[in-house]
Amino acid sequence: MNTLSKHAFLRRTAGFASLAIAFFLAGPGTAKADASASLNVTATVASKCKIDSTTTGLSFGDYDPTDTTDATANNGQIQVKCTKGSTHSITMGPGTGTGANCTGTPVRYMKQGTDQLQYALYQDSSFSTVWGCTTGTGGNAYSYSASSNNYSNITVYGKIPAGQDVPAGSYSDTVTVTVVF
């Protein structure tokens, strides 16, 4: 080997050695690359409702069968809690009185033994919209739109037609309230 080539060989070898030492000292961190991806997060908010079990019953107080004026009450309360922004129908069953039904305009009866006192439930204070038993066309269900998910008090209005021929006593009925969602 000639001197010149020996010298070039040593320079090349020193250059490669320097490069290897620099790579070794830099460590594996310089060889890594970051990778990223997206994680999708989803949820479906359910349209739900609850009726508070502490609803306030409708009390007519004393009914005078000799009076010619209908007896009215507006102290019943239903407490409903639904998903914000949802709209639901609230229905009232016919009750437990004999002959109570939901065909057409609901017919409801309070009872005491075998005696019955007819009454009606209404959605409004003018007693113009009877509270229906079913949803859909002609069902007269109450339409409720939730502005928040807090409980809302919905007033129940009632009327007992005047002049019913019934004996004195304490009359009552139980009506099932349903929120359709």
Image: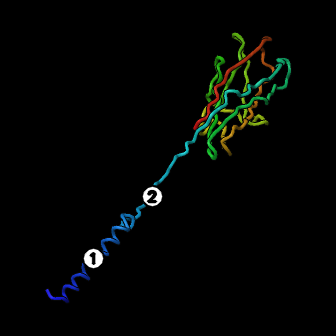
In the foreground, 145 or 22: 22
In this rendering, the answer to whether 157 lies above or below 7 is: above
Q: Is mark 1 on a helix, strand or loop?
A: helix
Q: Earlier in the sequence, mark 1 or mark 2?
A: 1
In which image quadrant can residue 160 be found?
top right
Using the rendered image of the protein, determine whether residue 106 is visible from the camera's viewpoint: yes
What residue is shown at x 79% (from left), y 29% (from top)? 75
Is residue 40 found left or right of 160 in the rendered image?
left
Provide residue 136's location: percent of width, then percent of height: 59, 39
Mark 2: which amino acid?
Ser
Count of numbered badges drawn on the protein: 2
The disc placed on residue 16 is 1
* Rendered location of residue 121, percent (x, y): 72, 29
Is residue 111 positioned above or below 26 on the image? above
What percent of the width, then of the height, locates residue 28? 36, 64
Could you classify mark 1 by the number of other residues whose Cα lies within 10 Å: few (under 14), some (14-19), or many (20 or more)? Answer: few
Q: Nearer the viewer, residue 103 or 156?
A: 156
Residue at position x 67%, y 44% from top? 148
Residue closest to the eye, 89 or 128: 89
Q: Which residue lies furthest to the left in this view?
A: 1
Q: Which of 79 and 14 is in front in this view?
A: 14
- Which quadrant would residue 74 be assigned to in this image? top right
Relative vertical location of residue 126 with respect to residue 118 in this rendering, above or below:
below
Write down the quadrant of residue 3 in the picture: bottom left
Q: Residue at x 80, y 23 (%)?
A: 60
Q: Quadrant of the N terminus?
A: bottom left
- Position of 122 relative to 17 (above/below): above
Q: Which label belongs to residue 40?
A: none
Q: On the image, numbered disc 2 is attached to which residue?
A: 38
Q: At x 74% / y 31%, what residue is drawn?
A: 77
Asked if the residues shown at circle 1 and circle 2 are in contact, with their CB atoms under 8 angstroms apart, the answer is no
> Can residue 104 be seen by looking at this rendering?
no
